[in-house]
Amino acid sequence: MRRKATYPVVDLFAGPGGLGEGFATMLCPAANNRYAFRTVLSIEKEDYAHATLTLRHFYREFSPEAVPEEYYDYLAGHISKDTLFETYPSEAAAARKSTWKCTLGEESHEKVKRRIAGRISGHDKWVLLGGPPCQAYSLVGRSRMQKMPEFASDPRHFLYREYLRTIEDHRPPVFVMENVKGLLSAKLGNENVINLIIRDLCEPGKAVSRNITCLSYRLYSLSESGLKGLDSDPCSFLVKAEDYGIPQARHRIFIVGIRGDIDIEPDILSRTSPVSVREVIGGMPVIRSGLSRSADSYQAWKDVIASIMRQSWYIHSKTNGLATLTEEAEKTLQMLNNYNLLEKSSTKYSARTSMRDWLCDGRLETLSSHEARSHMNSDVQRYFFAALFSAVNGASPKLADFPARLLPKHKNVQLGRKGDMFSDRFRVQLPDGPATTITSHISKDGHYFIHYDPLQCRSLTVREAARLQTFPDNYKFEGSRTSQYQQVGNAVPPLLANKIAEVIYEILKSIR
C-alpha cells in the first residue's frame, strides 16, 4: 500500500491528471519517504481522460516499489484492465472513489459540495487545484468564436465560477488556479477577463452569491515575489515552463491564493538550466511514418522520400542555393539504405534521457504509445525537407523557404509565403532547445510537431509528446490515439506541478 500522505488535494477540471500527478509525487523533506500530498478527489468530465485518471489513481494506491507486476502486464497489453482491477479490488475501489466523472456546472451543486466535503473529511490543511476549460480564453479559440453570436454567453467563460463556488463552500487555506496565456488579452465586453477573475478570486463569496462575508484571499505569483492586487500587472502570474527545467516553451497563468486569515507569503519557483528536446526524446527508438491514401510498406515509404531526388528543385539545387541541404539529404538516404527495416511503432523501452530519474521506470519493459502517424506522400516529403532544412540552418523553415514543388495546394499558402499568415505551417521541433508548446492541436495533424530527425520523417508520437510534457513513461493514457494526444496537449506538465507542490507544501507546513 501507498505510504500515508500529509495533505489532501482536490483537483477540479483535472484532465488526465498532470497537475495532481506533480503533487502526488512530492515527498516530504526529511520525513522517511512520506508523501506530502494525496489527491483525494479528481473531477473530470471527458470519458477517456477520466479513465486515465482512474488508472493513475490505482497506480498511486501502491508505493513505487510495491506496484504489482500485473500493472506492467496491462501496459504491455498482456492482460485487460478489468483483470488488473479484479486482481486488486480494494485498490481499484479506492481509485474509483477518488476519481469522479462529472460535468461541473451541470451536476447538482449540492451533490458536488457533499462529495468534496466527504473527501476532505474535516482536514483544515488541504489544497484546491484546477484550471477551468480554456477554449473560450485561448487566442485561437477566441478569434474563431468571436464571430459567433453566442460567444459572449459561452459557458466556458464562466466555468471558473464553479471553482469559486468550491472556494466559497469549503474555504481551502490554499488554492492554485491554472489557465492559458490568452486569458491576459481576453475581453468580455469592455473589461479584461483576467481583471474580473482576479477580483473574484480575492472575494469569492461576493462574486458567486453576493454574500458579503469575511472570506477573502491574497493572491501570489509563482514567478514574481510579493502580494499581487488589483493594481498589479496580470502578466506577473505568467509562468514560463522552460525556465524551470521543463523541455518545452509552455507559458501559462498560475494564481496562488492564500486565505485572508493566513499571514504567509509563499516562495517563488527556482529557475533551472534549460532542457533540450534531444535530451528527452533523442534516445527513443527510431521509427518511420506510415503512408496514408496509398499502399504502405517500408520500401514504398523509402521510394516516396527518394523520389524527391527526381524533382527539379533538387536537380538544380546548386543554382537555387540548396546544395548544402541536398548533400544532407543524400547522407540521410544513404543511412536509410543501412536499415533493413524501419517499423511504424516500437515497444522497445529505452531509458536514455537526461531526465531519467523523473521519466523512467526500471521495471518497465514495454514502451507504450510510441506509434507514428500515417501521412500523405506529399506531407512525408515536406516533413523530410523541413527536418533537413532545420538540420542545416538551425531553424525551422517558413513557407517561403520551401521549393514551390513541395508547397501544399491551400488558398492561404501564398499569403504565408509573404509572411502575412501561417508562415510556419510546418514547424520542426529543434533538437537543441525546448520544444514549442505541446497543445491539443497535435491531435489534428502533425504539421507543427515535426520530429527533428529527417531519417524518421514524421510528427511526434504520443509518448514523445508526453515526455516533453514530463509525464513519466509508466503513465498510460487511455482511449484512441487522438484522445491521447488531446489529453497530453491539455495537461499541466507534472514536473512543473511537482515544483509548485514544493511551494504549496511550505505554506501548509507553516500554518499554525
Image (cartoon, helix red, strand yellow):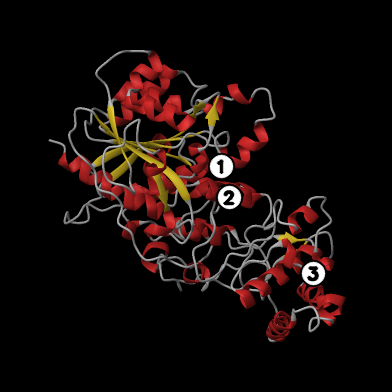
Can residue 218 be seen?
A: yes
Disc on the earlier residue, 2 or 3: 3
Q: Give the residue pinned by disc 3.
A: 403
In the structure shown, which secondary structural element does the residue marked by tag 2 occupy?
A: helix
Which amino acid type corresponds to the residue marked 1 in the rendered image?
Tyr
Residue 161 at x, y = what percent? 44, 24
Up the image or down, 423 lies above or below 316; here it is above
- Which mark is nearer the camera, 2 or 1? 2
Residue ID at (46%, 43%): 53
Which amino acid type corresponds to the residue marked 3 in the rendered image?
Pro
Disc on the earlier residue, 2 or 1: 1
In the structure shown, which secondary structural element does the residue marked by tag 3 occupy?
A: loop
Q: Residues within 10 Å of mark 2 (few under 14, many from 20)?
A: many
Question: On the rendered structure, is 108 left or right of 120?
Answer: right
Residue ID at (50%, 45%): 52
Q: Tell me the number on the disc at residue 484.
A: 2
Residue ID at (65%, 62%): 459
Disc on the earlier residue, 3 or 1: 1
Disc 3 from disc 1: Cα separation: 41 Å
Q: Give the residue pinned by disc 1.
A: 48
Assess whether mark 3 and mark 2 are in contact (beta carbons under 8 angstroms).
Answer: no
Question: On the rendered structure, is 50 left or right of 338?
Answer: left
Question: On the rendered structure, is 244 left or right of 446?
Answer: left
